[in-house]
Image (cartoon, helix red, strand yellow):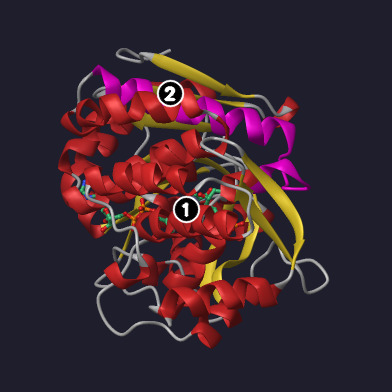
Amino acid sequence: MIDGVKRTVRVDLGERSYDILIGRSILSGLGEAFKTLFPSSEAVIITDSNVAGLHLDTAEASLREVGVDPYVIVMEPGEKSKSYKGLMKAADAVLDSKLERGDIVIALGGGVIGDLAGFVAGIVRRGMRFIQVPTTLLSQVDSSVGGKTGINTSHGKNLIGLFNQPHLVLADTAVLDTLTPRDFKAGYAEVAKYGLINDPDFFEWLERHWQGIFDGGPEREEAIARSCQAKADVVAADEKEADQRALLNLGHTFGHALEGMAEYDAERIVHGEGVAIGMVLAHEFSSRLGLCDAAVTDRVVAHLQAVGLPTHIRDIPGQLPKVDLLMDYIAQDKKVSRGNLNFILTRGLGQSFVEKGVEPAAVRAFLEEKLG
Ligand SMILES: NC(=O)c1ccc[n+]([C@@H]2O[C@H](COP(=O)([O-])OP(=O)(O)OC[C@H]3O[C@@H](n4cnc5c(N)ncnc54)[C@H](O)[C@@H]3O)[C@@H](O)[C@H]2O)c1
Ligand SMILES: O=C(O)C(=O)C[C@@H](O)[C@H](O)[C@H](O)COP(=O)(O)O
Ligand SMILES: [Zn+2]
């Protein structure tokens, strides 16, 4: 459809199917893609101030070339925008724009903007269509795909939201060159996650090729496309997390609790870092239950540390969290069923599975041992 697209991954969801377009410098093709899909619609772009300073001009210019003059909403960067307050600001601004239900919301940014804008699109005028234009590694390999949208509350991550699929994902891998090293690494945790879920060959490939991904070589597109394909397969099979989609939550029960206890303060932890530490904890917990060889955890830790990710709760700056507080967040996990946890555990490298009915007491004992 547009110049420079190297890979297309289809998310197969019947009438809600859509394409993920991946390629270097394809942001300038946004207008063409937009006009093809929505020939007579207007657009509102939701972005954050960091992304606006770097990539908004390209997106706007591309839309103007096809005769679309987008209304632009700029949010504060960071997790604090994924909140009731951020939702009010963004939703009111969409209404201020006077755009109609048939018009299109464009999420231009990382996972925070994608989750927020996707939610706003789902509820304003009872539902507008939206496009994801992910600009972080994390959002290109994970958050822009699959339709989970929403905001955080003081009770925990993503507790208010909707499943709402986008109509297109346009992932320009060149925009990742402007990410801070920390944000790039955080996104890489979700890439490694796909290997650890069910693809040991991919994990091994990452151990050999991660530097090329960071350097922007052809490995970057390959890793993004493989990650998107892995997620698309899971989502197509279980869109609303009735069962196996929960695998995509590997490391997140612990990771979300760590983000919550830090009150989403990016000085202490960002989502991908929570996932990295959480995946290590999930492996250690699996070993403690006699399911997984400790050597597997050592290999996971070695790789995450090689790329510069934190792997231990003690790596989070500030005071060590209290187990009670972590358990309060864990109790709010959306996978909880009748008070017990559905936990993603593993039997080995890339052998994760959904364990139903894990007793919170077992998790508490494990965390007390870790933090004691
Ligand atoms: N919906 C899902 O399936 C899903 C999946 C994974 C994560 N998430 C959510 O995604 C969020 C994390 O996403 P994230 O890591 O992208 O965080 P983010 O959106 O906060 O982006 C990280 C930082 O990078 C900046 N940034 C974005 N693009 C940039 C670019 N090209 N150049 C320079 N700076 C840029 C942002 O302004 C921000 O400061 C969390 O809220 C998490 O819960 C959702
Ligand atoms: O898409 C999914 O499903 C995931 O679990 C992907 C995760 O990486 C992502 O962080 C997601 O937002 C977590 O979902 P939640 O249901 O635990 O809030
Ligand atoms: Zn995640």
Residue linked to disc 2: 225
**170 and 351: which is toward the camera:** 351
Give residue 51's position: percent from left, percent from top.
24, 50
N-terminal of the pair, mark 1 or mark 2, is 2
| Amino acid bearing label 1 | Met
**352 and 243: which is toward the camera:** 352
Magenta extent? 218-246
> Which mark identifies residue 266?
none
Residue linked to disc 1: 279
Residue in view at x 25 percent, y 75 percent: 317
Q: Which quadrant, please, contains the C terminus?
A: bottom left
Q: Is residue 219 magenta?
A: yes
In the image, residue 162 sits, relative to residue 188, either above or below, namely below
**273 and 348: which is toward the camera:** 348
In the image, residue 197 sits, relative to residue 7, either above or below, namely below
| Amino acid bearing label 2 | Ala
Give residue 228's position: percent from left, percent from top.
49, 30
**368 and 115: which is toward the camera:** 368
